[in-house]
Amino acid sequence: MSWLKRAEKRNGKYQNPVPTSVGGLRTMWKVLPLYVSNREETEPREPLGPFVTDPRVYDTPPASGLRVTWFGHSSLLLEIDGLRVLIDPVWERRASPVQFAGPARFYPAPLALGDLPELDCVLVSHDHYDHFGASTLRQLARSKAASRALWVTSAGVGRRLEKLGVEQRRIAALDWLESAAVQGGSDDAGLRVTALPARHFSGRSLWDRFSTLWSSFVLEGPRHRVFFGADSGYWEGFREIGEQYGPFDLTMLEIGAFHPLWADIHMGPEGAARAYEAMGGPERCGPLFPVHWALFNLALHGWRQPMEEMCRLASERGIPLWYPAPGAPAEVVRGNLVQVPWWQKP
């Protein structure tokens, strides 16, 4: 049995690859008392950073051919085999429908949008506010940096990008198992981006859930291959992803915003460790890069807890972790783990 299939639609709504509970009003009533009684440090008591990216670093290509600048949460700039891919960019102050309320950033973006280098691709995994920053994307659509970029996203999300000013001809909105070819500045450079199933959901309100698709992605260049898990609960398809699309030089999996009430759609550290091992572990996945944490207060756990738990699990289970500081460009080199415990108390 293959778990990897095209997305199904029922009554106009996309379906998860396996039965999944995403919660609703009933879950909200269960969660509300927990928020009222919660005593965890869900937001930093002391200011973080400052984290600053020197844009001049992008004047020199990475010697290894693979470099990542993590801007926090799931926003990052991936430099792979001569191409630049901006993933899930959110520069907004809040991950929210409005900017006067909702989860606020723990620290400013390390790099101004206007200082981004020339991009070959903008990748948007799905349309949730912490991955799809409308103001950010609107500015990028008009920017010099993204003037020739291909915008790759999940099926249905392309219409949202068009409304923000992205030309339809520059959008590749993919169903699961579909791929898009990203061309670089030279004829011999190229990148294949493939959308794969994830266990999550979509929507920017309670009334448009499942109207667009959500995906994980494989990014494959001539020399390197990377997996970006975006948002997903654990599911049996991770094993098949590793077998069919690996090996990977770097595997990015979410670890934050987890809770037992929504374990189907956010796997947390334990699920990330399990997914990484199912995909083949260190032999097929390269190091594990934990993302989707330490920028917005989206759950009940302490803001440090996802990474502290991830480090404990990695030590117990022999998982090589790769974690740079926010805004610090870091090269991915086999046998050289970048580990900067920037979140720890002095």
Image (cartoon, rainbow, N blue to C red):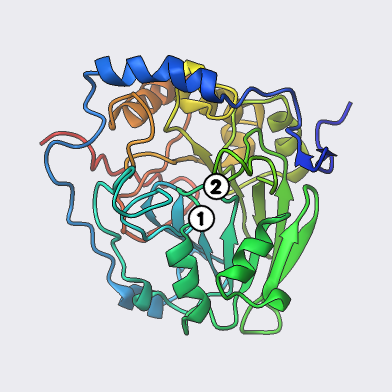
Could you say which disc has been placed on residue 204 in the image?
2
Q: Is residue 40 above or below residue 215?
A: above
Q: Is residue 95 above or below residue 179?
A: above
Decide which of 28, 323 is in the foreground and name it. Answer: 28
Please say whether residue 199 is visible from this viewpoint.
Answer: yes
Decide which of 37, 154 is in the foreground and name it. Answer: 37
Q: Quadrant of the C terminus?
A: top left
- Marks 1 and 2: in contact by CB < 8 Å? yes
Q: Residue at x 62, y 42 (%)?
A: 202
- Mark closer to the observer (2, 1): 2
Q: Is residue 127 left or right of residue 28?
A: right
**SS at mark 2?**
loop
Q: Residues within 10 Å of mark 2 (few under 14, many from 20)?
A: some
Q: Residue at x 23, y 38 (%)?
A: 343
Q: Residue at x 43, y 77 (%)?
A: 117
Residue under pointer 1: 132
Q: Residues within 10 Å of mark 1 (few under 14, many from 20)?
A: many
Q: Is residue 6 above or below residue 31?
A: below
- The picture places residue 203, in percent across and down from the top left corner, at 59, 44
Which amino acid is tagged 1? Phe
Cα–Cα span, label 2 and label 1: 9 Å
Q: Is residue 104 above or below residue 288?
A: below
Please say whether residue 318 is visible from this viewpoint.
Answer: no
Q: Residue at x 34, y 49 (%)?
A: 324
Could you say which disc has been placed on residue 97 in the image?
none
- The picture places residue 21, in percent across and down from the top left corner, at 63, 22
- The picture places residue 174, in percent across and down from the top left corner, at 75, 56
**SS at mark 1?**
loop
Count every numbered label the image shows and give the total.
2
Picture quadrant of residue 281: top right
Which amino acid is tagged 2? Arg
Residue at the farthest right position: 1
